[in-house]
Image (cartoon, grey):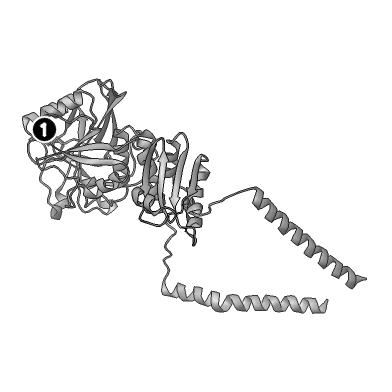
Amino acid sequence: MTRGFRHLHGWLFTLALLVAAGAVGYLTTRHDYVSDWTFGGRASLSAESRAVLATLPGPVDIVSYANPQGDLRHTVAGFMERYSRAKPDLSLRFVDPQQDPAAMRELGITVDGALIVHYQGREQRLDELSERSLTNALERLARGGERIVAFVSGDGERRPDDKGNADLGSFMTQLEARGMRAVPLNFAQATAVPQHTDLVVLASPELALPEGAVKALAEYVANGGNLLWLTEPTNDDLHLAPLADALGVRVLPGVLVDGQGAALGLKDPRMIALGDYPKHAITRGFTLTTLFPQVSALAVASRSDWQVAPFLRSSAQSWTEFKPIDNTQNSSIQYDASAGELKGPLDFGFALSRLSPSPEKAEQRVVVIGDGDFLSNSFLGNGGNRALGERIFDWLLGDDALVQLPPRGAPDRVLQISQTQLSAVTLGFLVALPLLLLCVCGVITWRRRRA
């Protein structure tokens, strides 16, 4: 009886296990549950992508021109599922490009699996299947059209289309993928800022601007235009006083230096590293470290109808240095109150806003920063410089919903171990673990035979 009962118990257990497995299989066909256990949930949509989807009220239709043979359609559908979970009214349908080659040529479809995203009568075409490319396309649709960013040129300003160390070509290439288009604005050829310009950028001119150019910029601001002004410690005599007066700000003399830079590993005292920021829409939730190579401090010069909010501020160990700085003699740099130097913390980034004088806009926005190097090709890759620059442009263009954190990092992608540790891991998995399993199996077999 005892042996028969054990056999019956074993068969019942097997039957119960099969029933449980069948029940689990049935439930998985009726209910969908997804859990992302990667660091920061990086296998799911990033915060940036979810923010873009939240700015798209109404359905989004995505058409994939993928060949039905092979696994490409399955790959596209699996990728789109992450987006459809965040936005249920996002739909995906497939079209066989081989059914109508003439229509494919008319649409410009040249890549198997190409996507066309449709939203409110507008569309974006993609030849690459990645979160970055699709989110950028959705962001361009969310903006409602291409944004025109005019860069003042002709007086030694940083160029948006050049790969020189001091220029902004790399940064603008990334912004163009997000729906912005950079155009030159040379006041030797134009007497005013063209209409339909969404933003004007004055990026660190090296020469004094002509009087007509300064007047045109001041009139542009007076009429409600948005402006990004990047100034430098060497830009103290460029005839820009009318523009500064119109904004009610003043560029302080000297170069900002930080006494705690050496503790952070910065050899040049003019390098300002920030990890904490004053509260503002631009810096809300922003925790990345940014690096500013050479900075002018700013101050509010007079009361005006502008609401001025600082969003970049140096540490209490900083000051405005008036003497020339030689990197080989950093120890001689000291704060000198008798010379008129100002002690930190000092602001070097202002965000200005007011009710727009233009009836076409609700709010006018201006950003003034005492440094332009942080967005240059040489320094764009430092910490969160690029992410901060994107936030500034999004805020200036009024795309508040797009002022979000960049894609999350993953510090656990690389495992760094020594050769000794690697050998120990290898022996553990190839020798020790198999021996342990054999020993466990032997003990279990021996105990069963004794029973």
- Residue 14 is drawn in which quadrant? bottom right
Where does the image place residue 211, in percent across and percent down from the top left?
6, 29
Mark 1 secondary-structure assignment: loop
Q: Could you tell me which quadrant the C terminus lies in?
A: bottom right
Where does the image place residue 37, in percent across and percent down from the top left?
53, 54
143 to the left or right of 296: right
325 to the left or right of 361: left
Q: Nearer the viewer, residue 32 or 209?
A: 32
Kindly identify the amino acid type of the residue bearing the numbered disc 1: Ala
- Residue 186 is drawn in which quadrant? top left
| Residue occupying image coordinates x 12% and y 51% | 326
| Residue occupying image coordinates x 16% and y 33% | 251
343 to the left or right of 442: left
Q: Nearer the viewer, residue 150 or 168?
A: 150
Q: Nearer the viewer, residue 412 or 97?
A: 97
Where does the image place residue 314, in percent across and percent down from the top left?
26, 40
Q: Residues within 10 Å of mark 1 (few under 14, many from 20)?
A: few
Q: What residue sits right under mark 1 in the picture?
A: 190
Q: Residue furthest right?
A: 1
Note whether 246 is above or below 273 in the view shown. above
